[in-house]
Image (cartoon, rainbow, N blue to C red):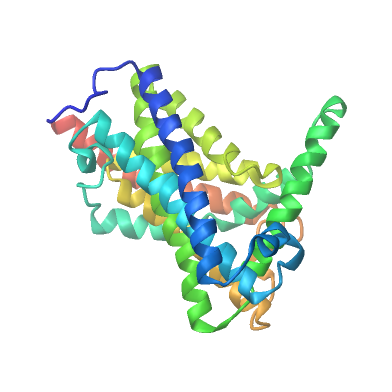
Amino acid sequence: MKKGILADAKPATQLLFVGLVFIGSWIVFQLLGMFSGMFIFNLNFQDVAYTFESINDSKMIGFLKYVQALTSIGMFIFSAIAAAYYIDYDWKNFLGLNKKPGLKAVLVSIIFIIIILPFTNFLTEFNSNLHLPEFMGGLETFFKEKEELMTKIMESFLQPSGMVGLFVNLLVIAVIPSIGEELTFRGIIQKVLIRWFKHPHWAIIVTAFLFSAMHFQFLSFLPRFFLGLVLGYVYLWSGSIWLSILIHFINNAMAVIFYNFYYGGKIGDYMEKIGTSENGMPWALAGIIAGIGLLYLIYRDYKYKNSIS
């Protein structure tokens, strides 16, 4: 195995380096996206300054999607590869990209993320009814205002605009984030934390917390934290980052496709209500029980491989 410059560094040093690369890439690619986007979409500084006041303008939506895509590529994919390279020159192997998941694991993952939908909806509803202590009221107001802004932007992004628009939304909201965020959080941060804590469970919990907190969306913290736990254990048990990327992609893609048809007037909002108070707890319980059963299949293979190695 080819060791990188930081291969023998302490986990804290490795995480610090990852954080610096992450922040640096975010700044560079954000600026690159904004300036190149202004040129591509024929916008000036005044237009960009009033971005959120013209959020429903098609040109501005296109600009925001472009900046979002380029920033995500730099902030997550580029920074993850760069950081992994300095830890291990064989960065593909370090990130779990060399190991391809088996067909059974792929099918189990696809079925899991679909069947767990009622429980995810239940967590979302439960989370939306939570409140911070009174002395943290200002912070809760900040989170809710940011949540409303993010919801407004996402609704503008997801307005139906034909098959081309659907493809672009899948690319910006599902493909790029699923690859980038998994490389960063599961591929690097979780792996370094396992070495630090010498205990995979704590590493997975902390990584899932950081993964959810990074989105700065208080009202959807719990379902995203739960997803982070699932992604962490799937990566631990399978050893393949591709399986985590697949689950992450399907989770995001379902939302994109659902909203595309929902806003297009082709289906109702039934999917969002499965597992909530309107449909009852049984759906949520059935979903989580079935989901745990499916994850056990991946865990069983993991235990079997370890027992014969």
Classify residue 136 as left or right of residue 240: right
Looking at the rendering, in which quadrant would you find the N terminus? top left
Furthest toward the right, the residue is 134
Image position, residue 161 (x, y; %): 58, 81
Classify residue 158 as left or right of residue 199: right
Can you tell which quarter of the image residue 108 is in? Answer: bottom left
Classify residue 176 as left or right of residue 126: left
Q: Is residue 233 visible?
A: no
Name the residue rendered at 19%, 35% in the picture.
89
Count of number-bearing discs: 0
Can you tell which quarter of the image residue 186 is in? Answer: top left
| Relative depth, front residue between 51 and 16 | 51
Q: Is residue 45 visible?
A: yes
Image position, residue 248 (x, y; %): 45, 53
Image position, residue 149 (x, y; %): 73, 54
Looking at the rendering, in which quadrant would you find the C terminus? top left
Name the residue rendered at 63%, 65% in the picture.
44
| Relative depth, front residue between 72 and 241 | 72
In this view, 97 is above or below 170 = above
In this view, 279 is above or below 202 = below
Furthest toward the top, the residue is 10
Name the residue rendered at 59%, 63% in the picture.
64
Image position, residue 104 (x, y; %): 28, 56
Classify residue 256 as left or right of residue 244: right
Can you tell which quarter of the image residue 278 is in? Answer: bottom right
